[in-house]
Amino acid sequence: MAKQELKKEIWVPWMNRVLHLASLAEGQTSPNPLVGAVILDSRQNLVGEGFHFAAGDHHAEIEALSQAGKAAKGGTLLVNLEPCCHHGKTPPCTDAILESGLSRVVVAVKDPDPRVSGKGISCLERSGVEVVTGVLEKEAAFLNRAFFYRIRTGRPWGILKWAMSFDGRIALPNGSSKWISSPKSRKQVHALRAKCDAVIVGGQTVRTDNPLLTSRGLSKIEPLRVVLSSSLDLPEDARLWDIKEADTAICFGPESSKKLLEKLPKGPEKILLEESSPKRLLETLAEKGCNKVLWECGSSLATSAIKQNCVQEIFVYLSPKLLGGFNAMTPLADLGFTSMDQVLTFNDVSLFKVEKDLVLNVLVTRDV
Amino acid sequence: MAKQELKKEIWVPWMNRVLHLASLAEGQTSPNPLVGAVILDSRQNLVGEGFHFAAGDHHAEIEALSQAGKAAKGGTLLVNLEPCCHHGKTPPCTDAILESGLSRVVVAVKDPDPRVSGKGISCLERSGVEVVTGVLEKEAAFLNRAFFYRIRTGRPWGILKWAMSFDGRIALPNGSSKWISSPKSRKQVHALRAKCDAVIVGGQTVRTDNPLLTSRGLSKIEPLRVVLSSSLDLPEDARLWDIKEADTAICFGPESSKKLLEKLPKGPEKILLEESSPKRLLETLAEKGCNKVLWECGSSLATSAIKQNCVQEIFVYLSPKLLGGFNAMTPLADLGFTSMDQVLTFNDVSLFKVEKDLVLNVLVTRDV
């Protein structure tokens, strides 16, 4: 094994701690990434740690440095993402690192943000700080897959979730669906919402289910509740129109009737999209700072989202029930496949059990 | 703990061996049950064992006794089902047991067959043989659930199997379905067929899939391949019409057109049912000696089978794929439910992974 590789392995346990710290703020930092930091003194004792809690708050490095104080001198900083070298809402972290007298910085993965991307590392190296890179690189990229994806594509990472019975139904023929999954599964969905920046449904879901779509207080910042509706045929009363608990945005395309526009409820924000499509919606949500969104819509919108490459990950809550049916109460509508060679196939399925339900999780976008 | 209970526990390890022996002939013994036997001499050494291999062959007790010979004297016979006391295709086992000089018989469960039910045990006790009952009783009843169910209801135990994608589809809109599940899953289905006495499809499956429905040689006695067709609108050529590899039966009701009847292929047996329904079909198959049948049909027939209580167990092969669709390519059609309180719900799901597929197994009939 090469010397550099051996060196890297030494840092793995601490970098795992860094990733854990970073993950604590999941759903709270957008448009920023998840970042954690650990500082060891020159004798490898832990003297500081922290994580980025929310956009505008201190960066993780600064949190850790303020804990470490003078003990940072000659020590090592471990951080999952390359430190920034530009003035954003806060000053560059590289300045603070150089001032602290740290002699080594261990980075998991380079920041894909073009304002940083390698510049943070070279700034440190030019000033004589030893920089070790690529420690738990894949794991760090995976943790920030939503941020990375948004930087790369200009759209947030999309998660599609549905609950279905063993016979693949998401509702009875008459529309009843409360509840297919278990109480504990539904709580888990609240936690999933807490990790997302927006939750998206179509007009049909508002009309049929009248959902609340919050994390039930699990998230300090509730995700934005988004209704994508081309028809604007929305009920006068809906739980989503009450924005005391969480913000709501109604999004529509230029074809929407002005008459219906005037009838929209007052509370929610109204957003005119270039086109009423999943892709345009996600571009707009990225501009609003969303890294990760959750599709909780019916089969028609879910299918459009998949077709427009707006779904990167899927959660299926599978409940040991048989519903039966004759109409399209299925999770997806037509994907246009005419041969089994064309169907979407997944390699790795994460599987967990929640009470009597099975939860299947697959990545649609493998390149994270 | 009472004395009798302590005694019973002693026999558990040997009875587990008996159940294993019995299970070796799964799918081969119908209409008979699965039976295994172990003989210990008076010093508890194993001196004989055996199982019932096929109807007409020796019973398990006789197999084990012939191995044990004189060593059986003063020894113990362990058998999962109460020994028979009547003349069937072979003489009563109780006679052979008494002749052998065995001093104790340990039985897992009473034979529900009214010709035996308790009579075997009392015959032995009257002759001075100590009889211990109820050792692994539940496990033994579960192993022979198909036989028990047929005796109780006059119909074989029905297993319904389907393969579907993560979005609950069993085929593409154009009917393509080769293959949803993995090669290893399909082999496992061959093994499942080997454990059944008949495999049932509807005319639609013959027309669309032209299946072979054999165990691919895994079973010495291939299951009877059954086509239930009320319309008798069947293709002239189909792999099922070639009965070299396995027998086929075409079953239909009195309403079937005589014209189409004349056009049926020559090889398969033709069976006129009182009514072209799952229930009538299973009654007929029970009369033909089937304990366990496998429904490998499309959604329409599967739904009728469930509604008529002809499905006692379900296997779902769930493949990590998305197919999409707009028409009824779902495992089940309408079950007539109008409220979520009515849906079929299962308590215990057995889950296993076969390559990338998940296999879900549930009992619909809990009373086994």
Image (tube, coloured by chain):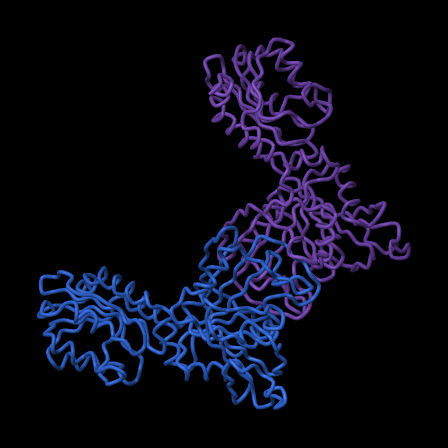
Chain colours: A blue, B purple
Is A124 on the left-hand or right-hand side of B284?
left
The image quarter in which residue B217 lies: top right
Q: Position of residue B123 (x, y in %)?
A: 67, 14
Q: Is any atom of residue A158 visible in this view? A: no
Q: Which one is nearer the viewer's eye here, A39 or A263?
A: A263
Report the number of numbered marks: 0
**Does residue B314 sit above or below B66 in this rendering?**
below
Residue plotted at (49% across, 16% down): B3
Task: Give the farthest residue toward the top.
Answer: B128
Q: Which one is nearer the viewer's eye here, A246 or B89?
A: A246
Is A85 on the left-hand or right-hand side of A342?
left
Q: Position of residue B324 (x, y in %)?
A: 60, 69
Task: Give the farthest residue toward the right.
Answer: B258
Q: Is any atom of residue B191 visible in this view? A: yes
Residue plotted at (49% across, 12% down): B42
Residue plotted at (42% across, 65% down): A217
Is A118 on the left-hand or right-hand side of B230?
left
Q: Which one is nearer the viewer's eye here, B333 or B340?
A: B340
Q: Position of residue A193 (x, y in %)?
A: 45, 67
Viewport quadrant of the C terminus of chain B: top right
Q: Position of residue A320 (x, y in %)?
A: 57, 52
